[in-house]
Amino acid sequence: MTVAVELEFTGSTLEQYDQALAKMGFVHGGSGGPGLLFHLVRKTDTGFHVTDVWESPEQFQSFAESTLGPVGMEVGMPNQPTIEVHEIYNYLAQDRS
Protein backbone atom coordinates (compact mmCIF):
# COMPACT_ATOMS: atom_id res chain seq x y z
CA MET A 1 0.00 0.00 0.00
CA THR A 2 1.45 3.36 -1.06
CA VAL A 3 1.55 5.96 1.73
CA ALA A 4 2.15 9.66 2.16
CA VAL A 5 4.32 10.48 5.15
CA GLU A 6 4.23 13.97 6.66
CA LEU A 7 7.13 14.84 8.99
CA GLU A 8 7.27 18.09 10.97
CA PHE A 9 10.76 18.96 12.21
CA THR A 10 10.24 21.62 14.88
CA GLY A 11 13.37 23.44 16.04
CA SER A 12 15.50 22.07 13.20
CA THR A 13 17.03 24.10 10.38
CA LEU A 14 17.40 23.67 6.64
CA GLU A 15 21.16 23.65 7.23
CA GLN A 16 20.71 20.55 9.42
CA TYR A 17 18.49 19.06 6.71
CA ASP A 18 21.26 19.63 4.13
CA GLN A 19 23.84 18.06 6.46
CA ALA A 20 21.59 15.03 6.97
CA LEU A 21 20.96 14.72 3.24
CA ALA A 22 24.72 14.70 2.55
CA LYS A 23 25.39 12.12 5.30
CA MET A 24 22.75 9.85 3.73
CA GLY A 25 24.44 10.21 0.32
CA PHE A 26 21.59 12.15 -1.30
CA VAL A 27 21.72 15.42 -3.26
CA HIS A 28 19.15 18.10 -4.09
CA GLY A 29 17.15 16.98 -7.13
CA GLY A 30 18.63 13.46 -7.03
CA SER A 31 17.20 10.05 -6.26
CA GLY A 32 16.09 8.87 -2.83
CA GLY A 33 16.32 5.58 -1.01
CA PRO A 34 14.66 2.28 -1.95
CA GLY A 35 10.87 2.60 -1.90
CA LEU A 36 10.82 6.42 -1.88
CA LEU A 37 8.70 7.72 -4.77
CA PHE A 38 8.58 11.44 -3.93
CA HIS A 39 10.25 13.82 -1.47
CA LEU A 40 9.40 17.49 -0.85
CA VAL A 41 10.85 19.81 1.82
CA ARG A 42 9.60 23.27 2.76
CA LYS A 43 10.67 25.78 5.39
CA THR A 44 8.18 26.58 8.15
CA ASP A 45 8.07 29.23 10.87
CA THR A 46 9.26 26.63 13.41
CA GLY A 47 11.64 24.48 11.34
CA PHE A 48 10.85 22.50 8.21
CA HIS A 49 8.23 20.09 6.87
CA VAL A 50 8.80 16.97 4.75
CA THR A 51 6.21 15.30 2.54
CA ASP A 52 7.20 11.87 1.21
CA VAL A 53 5.41 9.23 -0.82
CA TRP A 54 6.62 5.69 -0.10
CA GLU A 55 5.75 2.39 -1.79
CA SER A 56 4.82 0.97 1.62
CA PRO A 57 4.70 1.99 5.28
CA GLU A 58 7.21 -0.78 6.05
CA GLN A 59 9.79 0.75 3.69
CA PHE A 60 9.41 4.12 5.39
CA GLN A 61 9.62 2.55 8.86
CA SER A 62 12.77 0.65 7.94
CA PHE A 63 14.40 3.81 6.54
CA ALA A 64 13.35 5.87 9.57
CA GLU A 65 14.80 3.36 12.04
CA SER A 66 18.02 2.51 10.21
CA THR A 67 18.91 5.88 8.71
CA LEU A 68 16.69 8.89 9.38
CA GLY A 69 16.70 8.70 13.18
CA PRO A 70 20.43 8.10 13.65
CA VAL A 71 21.45 10.73 11.08
CA GLY A 72 19.07 13.30 12.60
CA MET A 73 20.76 12.84 15.97
CA GLU A 74 24.20 12.99 14.34
CA VAL A 75 23.53 16.44 12.84
CA GLY A 76 22.05 17.76 16.09
CA MET A 77 18.36 17.97 15.30
CA PRO A 78 16.89 18.84 18.70
CA ASN A 79 13.57 16.97 18.47
CA GLN A 80 12.11 13.85 16.93
CA PRO A 81 9.75 14.84 14.11
CA THR A 82 6.01 14.44 14.44
CA ILE A 83 4.92 11.89 11.85
CA GLU A 84 1.60 11.29 10.14
CA VAL A 85 1.11 8.42 7.69
CA HIS A 86 -1.77 8.45 5.20
CA GLU A 87 -2.86 5.74 2.77
CA ILE A 88 -2.70 6.97 -0.84
CA TYR A 89 -5.64 6.33 -3.13
CA ASN A 90 -3.89 7.63 -6.30
CA TYR A 91 -0.87 9.62 -7.38
CA LEU A 92 0.45 10.83 -10.71
CA ALA A 93 4.12 11.22 -11.62
CA GLN A 94 6.12 12.38 -14.57
CA ASP A 95 7.51 9.55 -16.70
CA ARG A 96 11.29 10.00 -16.59
CA SER A 97 12.20 7.12 -18.88
Image: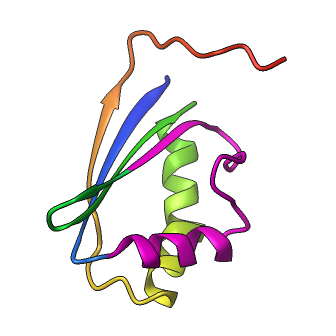
Q: Is residue 32 above or below residue 56?
A: below
Q: How many marks?
A: 0
Work out whether 74 lies above or below 21: below
Q: For the view shown, which residue lies furthest in the right direction? A: 97
Q: What's the colour scheme?
A: rainbow
Q: Nearer the viewer, residue 69 or 11?
A: 11
Q: Residue at x 37, y 41 (%)?
A: 5
In the image, is residue 18 above or below residue 26? below
Q: Is residue 30 left or right of residue 48?
A: right
Residue 8 located left or right of residue 73: left
Residue 16 at x, y percent in the picture: 44, 78
Instruction: Decide if residue 63 is on the left or right side of residue 81.
Output: right
Residue at left offset 48%, top offset 87%:
75
| Quadrant including the C terminus | top right
Q: Residue furthest left?
A: 45
Tell me where residue 38 sits by quadrant: top right
Quadrant of residue 4 within the rendered picture = top left
Q: Which residues are magenta?
A: 13-41
Q: Is 29 included in the stretch rendered in magenta?
A: yes
Q: From the viewer's perspective, is residue 52 above or below residue 79?
A: above
As rendered, which of 57 and 73 lies closer to the eye? 73
Q: Position of residue 29 (x, y in %)?
A: 65, 46
Residue at point 52% right, 43% down? 58
**Looking at the picture, how far across and down is residue 13, in whole percent?**
34, 75
Task: Give how far across and how far down residue 59 sits, in percent.
Answer: 58, 45
Q: Is 9 displayed left or right of 59 in the figure? A: left
- In depth, the one of 92 and 18 nearer the eye is 18
Report if residue 87 lies within the magenta region.
no
